Image (spheres, grey):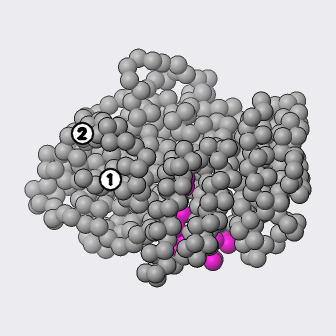
């Protein structure tokens, strides 16, 4: 919700740069302003170029770089492919950006034990292809899967639509190899499906946005590819009917593998900017998938269809062949290009409320849109109440930006009043850090700061992120 730079750092001392050059080969160390410029941004509108960029190619180089930065108290901003939206990969104190993009090897596969070990810079889709070749998949599948790294997925606990059935990265990572802010190498977790020795540091580090440790390797839990899949598209007259259907679907025994939601404004945009067969009178839409054994999936989709039917339903369509499935999903895939056309600099937030509160959230958002004269498009992962709220404004217009900031302030208040949370998978970064105190009480926040200090005594790992500024 903010654009521009945020900086508070002096140039790096020459002895530090000389020692850094002894650790990282010249071709993997960038210091020229033109070279480091691109590493000053992520998918937010913020930009602060770092003083230097290191591109390590192995774990030991990360260890040595962190130890050097710790000795000189130089801040480090860990980074993957920077597809995140809240400014988490922007080096607000300049210093060093440590990009894991060249640590992209899959180190070990163990299909008999259902896991693989990968470096943090591997792309999500590369992992999916490797797993598929063994008859498996890794559950997290964010929209940016073709570009984002595993390290970035873990930093934000980014999950995607399959989380409704298969969970987030926290449920799908067995262990980590990482480097703390003090330069200590740590191993967390296990290679087995069960293990309770010691504290669960794996789940603590996942979602910590690089403020506790830099993840260099991850042991990912694999799941067998389901042999069959069915897809439903269900259209309702209004959001209340769709929200009631989501509650019914999530209350019955069969859990869908995907349960996505699109509101009336999004439907209108799809109609305007693409060929669409959506019937008139559509006020909300659900995209639903079920997967499993061929002998079970038809019964599952019948059970889900029964729960989806109810007052306010306009249409229910089922797809079984890949061609039919692609046709139904083509409508949903038309939404993102339409949004980029209409508002290329839109503000995108991801909030979560209990599934039973979705209707109140969308109704409240409609009220905020009218109050602040802002078009708001809502879609997302209905099965776990994770809604992506898109404010279609031009942030370069100060008046529009001011209205949007007030709207977001009231949006976050609404979400917390509905017993929700400020972010489901996009993270906090810079954009939401000043709101964190509304959700987390002071005693809990103080404990989190103490944990941060144990992992990172000098506060060099991704400073200025996650917590409100003191």
- Binning the other alpha carbons within 10 Å of mark 2 as few (below 14), some (14 to 19) or many (20 upward) gives some
Foreground residue among 360 and 143: 360
Q: Is 465 displayed left or right of 20 in the figure?
A: right
Q: Residue 349 at x, y = what percent?
A: 53, 59
Judge whether 100 appears above or below 278 on screen. Answer: above
Regarding residue 69, the answer to whether it shows in the image is: yes
Badge 2 or badge 1: first in the primary sequence: 2
Instruction: Residue at 35%, 61% (x, y): give it.
Output: 90
Identify the residue under disc 1. Answer: 468
The Cα atoms of the two marked residues, 2 and 1, are separated by: 15 Å
Judge whether 265 appears above or below 80 on screen. Answer: below
Identify the residue under disc 2. Answer: 453
Q: Residue 366 at x, y = what percent?
A: 64, 65
Instruction: Residue at 72%, 72% (x, y): give it.
Output: 269
The quadrant of the image that shows the N terminus is bottom left
Q: Is 380 displayed left or right of 227 in the figure?
A: left
Helix, strand or loop under label 1: loop
Q: Residue 20 at x, y = what percent?
A: 19, 53
Judge whether 11 appears above or below 417 on screen. Answer: below
Regarding residue 60, the answer to whether it shows in the image is: no
Instruction: Residue at 32%, 53% (x, y): give it.
Output: 468
Instruction: Residue at 10%, 56% (x, y): give it.
Output: 15
Residue 347 among those drawn in magenta: yes
- What segment is highlighted magenta in the picture? 337-351
- Binning the other alpha carbons within 10 Å of mark 1 as few (below 14), some (14 to 19) or many (20 upward) gives some
């Amino acid at each position: 919700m903010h654009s521009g730079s945020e900086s508070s750092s002096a140039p790096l001392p020459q002895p530090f740069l000389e020692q850094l050059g002894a650790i990282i080969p010249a071709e993997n160390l960038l210091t020229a302003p033109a070279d480091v410029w691109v590493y000053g941004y992520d998918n937010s509108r913020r930009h602060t170029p770092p003083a230097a960029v290191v591109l390590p190619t192995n774990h030991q180089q990360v260890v040595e770089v962190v130890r050097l930065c710790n000795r000189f108290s130089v801040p480090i901003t860990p980074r993957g492919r920077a597809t995140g939206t809240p400014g988490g990969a922007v080096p607000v104190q300049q210093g060093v950006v440590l990009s894991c993009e060249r640590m992209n090897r899959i180190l070990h596969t163990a299909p008999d034990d259902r896991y693989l070990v990968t470096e943090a810079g591997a792309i999500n889709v590369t992992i999916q292809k490797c797993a598929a070749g063994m008859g498996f998949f890794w559950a997290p599948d964010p929209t940016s899967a073709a570009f984002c790294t595993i390290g970035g997925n873990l930093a934000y606990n980014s999950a995607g639509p399959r989380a409704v059935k298969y969970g987030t990265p926290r449920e799908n990572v067995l262990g980590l190899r990482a480097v703390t802010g003090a330069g200590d190498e740590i191993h967390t977790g296990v290679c087995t499906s069960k293990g309770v020795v010691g504290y669960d540091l794996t789940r603590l580090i996942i979602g910590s946005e690089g403020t506790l440790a830099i993840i260099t390797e991850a042991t990912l839990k694999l799941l067998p590819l389901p042999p069959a899949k069915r897809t439903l598209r269900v259209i309702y007259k209004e959001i209340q009917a769709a929200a009631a259907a989501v509650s019914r679907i999530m209350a019955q025994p069969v859990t869908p593998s995907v349960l996505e939601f699109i509101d009336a404004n999004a439907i209108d945009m799809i109609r305007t900017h693409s060929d669409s067969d959506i019937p008139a009178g559509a006020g909300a839409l659900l995209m639903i998938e079920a997967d499993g054994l061929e002998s079970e999936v038809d019964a599952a989709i019948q059970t889900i269809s029964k729960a989806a039917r109810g007052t306010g339903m306009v249409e229910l369509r089922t797809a079984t062949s890949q061609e039919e499935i692609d046709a139904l999903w083509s409508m949903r895939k038309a939404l993102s290009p339409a949004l980029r056309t209409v508002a290329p600099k839109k503000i995108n937030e991801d909030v979560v409320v209990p599934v039973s509160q979705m209707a109140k959230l969308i109704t409240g958002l409609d009220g905020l849109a009218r109050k602040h004269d802002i078009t708001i498009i809502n879609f997302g992962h209905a099965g776990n109440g994770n809604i992506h709220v898109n404010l279609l404004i031009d942030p370069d217009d100060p008046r529009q930006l001011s209205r949007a900031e007030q709207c977001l302030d009231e949006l976050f208040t609404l979400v917390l009043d509905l017993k929700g949370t400020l972010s489901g998978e996009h993270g906090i970064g810079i954009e939401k850090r000043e709101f964190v105190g509304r959700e987390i009480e002071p005693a809990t926040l103080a404990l989190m700061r103490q944990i941060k200090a144990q992992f990172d005594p000098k506060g060099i790992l991704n400073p200025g992120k996650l917590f409100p500024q003191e």
